[in-house]
Image (cartoon, coloured by chain):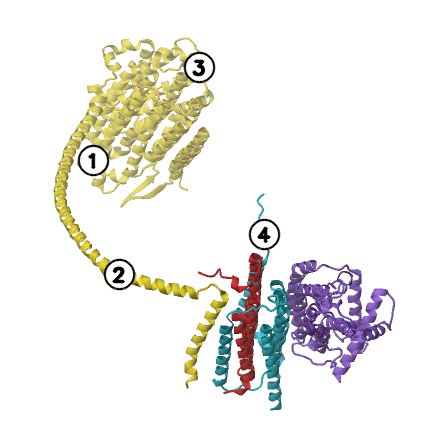
Amino acid sequence: MTTALILLLLAVGAYLVAVIEAWTVSGRWQLAAPITAGIALLGRESIVPRKLDRVFFEVAPVLLLISALLAATVLPLTPGLIITDLATGALFINAALVYVLVALLMAGWGPNGAYAMIGGWRFLGQLIAYAMLIVMPVTAVAMRAESLLTTQIVTSQADLWNILYQPLGFVLFFVAAMALAFLPPFDLTTATSELAGGVEAEYSGVRLAVFRLGRLVLVITLAATTVVFYLGGWQGPWLPPWAWSAIKILAVTALMLLAGRVLPRIREADLLNLCWKLGIPLALLNIFVVGLQVLVWP
Amino acid sequence: MNLIAVTILAPLAAALLILLLRRIPGALALSGATTGLLASLALLADTGAGVSHEIQLPGLPNLPLSLIATPLTTLLSGLVAIIGGLVVVYAIGYMKRDDEKVRFFASMLLFVAAMQTLVLAGDWILLLAAWELIGLASYLLIGFWFRRPGVKSAATRAFLYTRSADLGLYVAVFILIADAGSSDITTTLNTGGGAATAAGLLLLVAAMGKSAQTPLHDWLQRAMAGPTPVSALLHSATLVAAGAILLIRTAPMLPDKVLLVIGIVGGITTLVTGLIALGERDLKRTLAASTSSQYGLMLVAVGAGAPLAALLHLLAHAFIKSSLFLGAGVFQHSRDSTAFSELHGAGRDRPWIFFGFALAALALTGIPPLSGFFSKDAIIAAALISSYAPLFTTFVLASTLLTGAYMARSLRILWQGNIALHNIAGLAWMGAALAGLVILAAVLGAAFPAIEAMFSDPLPGNNVAVILGLVAAVVGLTLGWFVPAQRLLGPLRPWSQRSFAIAGGFNTWVVRPALATARSCERLERALYNEVLALGRLGLNVARSCERLERALYNRVLALGRLGLSLGQAVRLGDERGIDGLIFSLVRGVTYLGSRARRLQSGLIHRELAITVVVTALIFATLLIPILTF
Amino acid sequence: MTPELFPALITGAALFGIGIYGALSQTNLVMLLMGVELILAGAMVNLVAFWHHLHPDTPAGQMFVLIVMTVMAVEMAVGFGVAIARFRAIGSVEMEEAAELKG
Amino acid sequence: MAMISAQTFFISFFGLAAVWFGVVVFRTHSMMRSALALLFSQTAIGAMFIGMQAEFLGVLQIMMMATEMSIMAIFMVMFMMDPGGLGKMDMTHQKRLSVITGLVAFVAIVAVAVFTDWGPLAGSVPDSAQQTEDLGLELMGRSMLIFETAGLTLLTAMIAATAVAVEPIKRNRD
């Protein structure tokens, strides 16, 4: 029952993400656009390239969708509204999201196409850049909550949200999350302008629809994760928890998408430099500071 | 801090500082001397007030070193300090042109410090040490201009004289300490009998040496080679005085016979040296001779049993003679010589200096109310009442007459003549020092009653003595002023020229013994040499025999070696046949196995991995056997 | 005889064997590393199995697994470093061509 | 009993998956495939851990191995063309020896596993939150030295590998 509800909510979320993305691109509210686009994709012929690696080609979109869904399973939207409250939830989110990489590698490798492969490898480099910046801020969050349970992480922010408690961690995590969702300016994998869609280049029809859906779910999941980790989850005055979760998640989504629109795309070499020479030291500093804070205000 | 210590250490410290810093020696010397002067004056005041100071130093086992402040010692130390200070002031001017001030002032202050130690010494050992020190310091100072001809010999001569006389002091001190069982002077003064006699005579010898009594008077005049301030110090308060001081301090213990001898020696000295002074052609030498004569007078006083009178005359004479020398130094500077032939009219150049000089001369002659008058007529009185009155009185009166004569003579020579004015560097300093000394020399008589009170021992005095003394002095002066010295001396003149070197003076009394000792030493040395030579020969013989033995041994060893060689040959043969063959076969086997093993080691990682795994598997199998078989 | 352990232990053994085979048979350095990874994986399986079935109350077993994971990471890093250096040097990572260790 | 059997089934299933993927690693000619096969084998092992209620380790294994094997994949493609060995060429040597060794090792270990008496089975396993806490305490407590050493070793390996791998700097004499 809960699972079904969560899946439904995720579908709605994906729809809203699509709407918001369209709005950030075109500036107009086209509520029907996602639906029509989806139907169009489903109806279109799905072309299969020659000399492809069938397994990877077929598995990749599904794996992307699945990993995003798996990550979503440990995210509490309201108290009790959570599929499985794993004792290692925070870690499990990372574990599930790493398979986004695997999916993209498959999608890049499978169709036996140059652009796709380049996109896939690029994402690997991108992962090497952002992976640490996902894990280390989460470590700080877990330090404050003294647990990996996502629900406990949420309740640990009852008096002060982590965005205020560890703003540095929030910034790092936000950037890393955008890189993980390969949103602009980190959309090196699907750089429409230079790689003709990168990993998406060879996909069409149903598979492309699944791929897009997976990406939308990934975005909404990451937004939810950010909310859970840093924005106090469902907590908030006056309004009921579900409303707060919805508001926060949508706001974070909009922020992510808008940020991508105003920033120029970044080269992966620069991204690596930035993350390893600036990001990781900052993350370590964040852990240190949070440790001190935890000692000072338990 | 004890005043005695300051009195002694201040000059010493100044000397060391001068040697260390090697600059502003004058200022340092002056400050050091002044400090010592103040300290010793305070000491004098304390002692006058009855406060007694004493320092006990750990010396030889149960012979502690001590410094005591009795009226006598403090008085002498005050004298030394005053004269030392003024002479230093004078020297600052006198040595202005000299470029070895450092050495000069350093040894000067050392001299002062040593003298202070000597006068303040409370026990014989310290006194001996100080005695030696002043000997050394005087040697340094007399030989100060050692580059000038004759100076070295003069210094050496003075040193030898005093040292040879010092032997007497040593023996005397040994006798005294052995007799009294203590090195404390005051306790040793109670000794009597033969020991006292022997010690007294030996002390007299020492005093004769230091105070240049006949027949050891010769060195003093030659010591004029030193700088004038040195002469002033030497004659007035320090070196020469030491002899007299020794006798004055030990006077209480001296038996009559010794006193008689002392008196006779002093009397002869005073006459002989007076004549010498009269016959001299050199101002400073005249003064030197007169010094000897005055000390002779003091010895007479001691012999007459009036050490206090001697002490008073010592004080008076110290100031007088130092002022005389200082004046002479001025004249020397103005004429670059001390020969009378050059000094005609030198007095007119600087009337004030001459006035001071004349005042001092009159004081020495004993004209009232100058200090010399009181001390001298005290001596005359003592001679009159002494048990050998006729002898001593003649001595004293004759010496007084002679004094007047040679003083008048030198005054005349200095006055008559024409002016030849040179300007002298540092005249201000010299004049100041001279003035101070002359004033003291003039008015010191006023202090004598206080000193008598301090010693609580009234001076003998009567009108007869006064009249005799005055008569003698005036006669001497008139003779000296009007009659030239040659005629005055008459037949004695050639002797006096040779300064009465009785029995060859220096040669007889110093050089011969020295040479004799040298010869005996040489003889001893030759004997030793022969001994050593004999020993060497013996050693050579032993060595030869050893060598013979060694050669024999060598032959034996050689034979043994040959035997060993032949054995080695045999063994080698055996090796080549048997053992080598075995080893070679072993080597071949090893190389064979190695080539086999090398094939295993291919360097290909998978091969090596495979080998590793297989071997590990075998090992595990062996480990598994027990597990699988139960 | 404790049958509860069989699934895990046999899996570990199989992984170990496969790893041995890979490490020995592959001509390529990276494949060889894969074999080593498999060997370590088998070891980890056994460790976890023993921990779970025999000493679940002592975290030391899990700690050991963590150490093994570290070892895997180290082995990967060093192996790839060597591979890159070798590839840069002679343009290939074929084991057949690597006989420099021959003494 | 049912729980145990379900668990055993779970473990066995993922064990079989792990082994199967392990075999695939050396069966395929596509480097990409072998790398990802190894990845899935490791993932299956992680799943086994979770099945054996070592939740933290399982999740950690899944996460780490995904990254590691992806990196391995790119190296594979870098160093040997794909398909590996350019087609049908055999990429193995001393095959028989390897097979035999592998089989022997497998049999021996299975024998040990089967014929050894591993002693009494422990009862219930503490719940995963408890485990995680214990593990953390263990790491920060008794085993701290070991763990720090491991971390240090890892750092050293990273630095060394980088130093070995970077292009040697051309020292131009001027």
B407 to C4, vertically: above or below: above
Give the number of the mark in front: 4 or 2: 2
- Please name whichever residue, D90 or B581, is drawn nearer the observer in this view of the structure: D90
Which chain is painted in purple?
A
Query: What is the chain identity of the residue bearing mark 1?
Result: B
Q: CA distance from mark 4 to mark 2?
A: 58 Å
Decide if residue B465 is in sight here: no
Q: Are marks 3 and 4 in contact (CB under 8 Å)?
A: no
Q: Classify mark 2: residues with Cα within 10 Å, few (<14), some (14-19) or many (20+).
A: few
- Please name whichever residue, D58 or B248, is drawn nearer the observer in this view of the structure: D58
Rendered image: mark on residue B196: 1
The answer to whether tags 1 and 3 share a subunit is: yes
Q: Colour of chain B?
A: yellow
Hey, which quadrant is residue B515 in on the image? top left
The image position of residue C40, as x and y in percent, is: 54, 73
Rendered image: mark on residue B351: 3
In primary-sequence order, the first of circles 1 and 3 is 1
Q: Are marks 1 and 3 in contact (CB under 8 Å)?
A: no
Give the number of the mark in front: 3 or 4: 4
Q: Secondary structure at mark 4?
A: loop
The image position of residue D172, as x and y in percent, is: 58, 46
Give the number of the mark in front: 4 or 1: 4
Q: Colour of chain C?
A: red
Which chain is painted in cyan?
D
Decide if residue B617 is in sight here: yes
- Please name whichever residue, A45 or A225, is drawn nearer the observer in this view of the structure: A45
Rendered image: mark on residue D169: 4
Q: CA distance from mark 4 to mark 1?
A: 106 Å
Q: Secondary structure at mark 3?
A: helix
In primary-sequence order, the first of circles 2 and 3 is 3
The answer to whether tags 4 and 1 share a subunit is: no
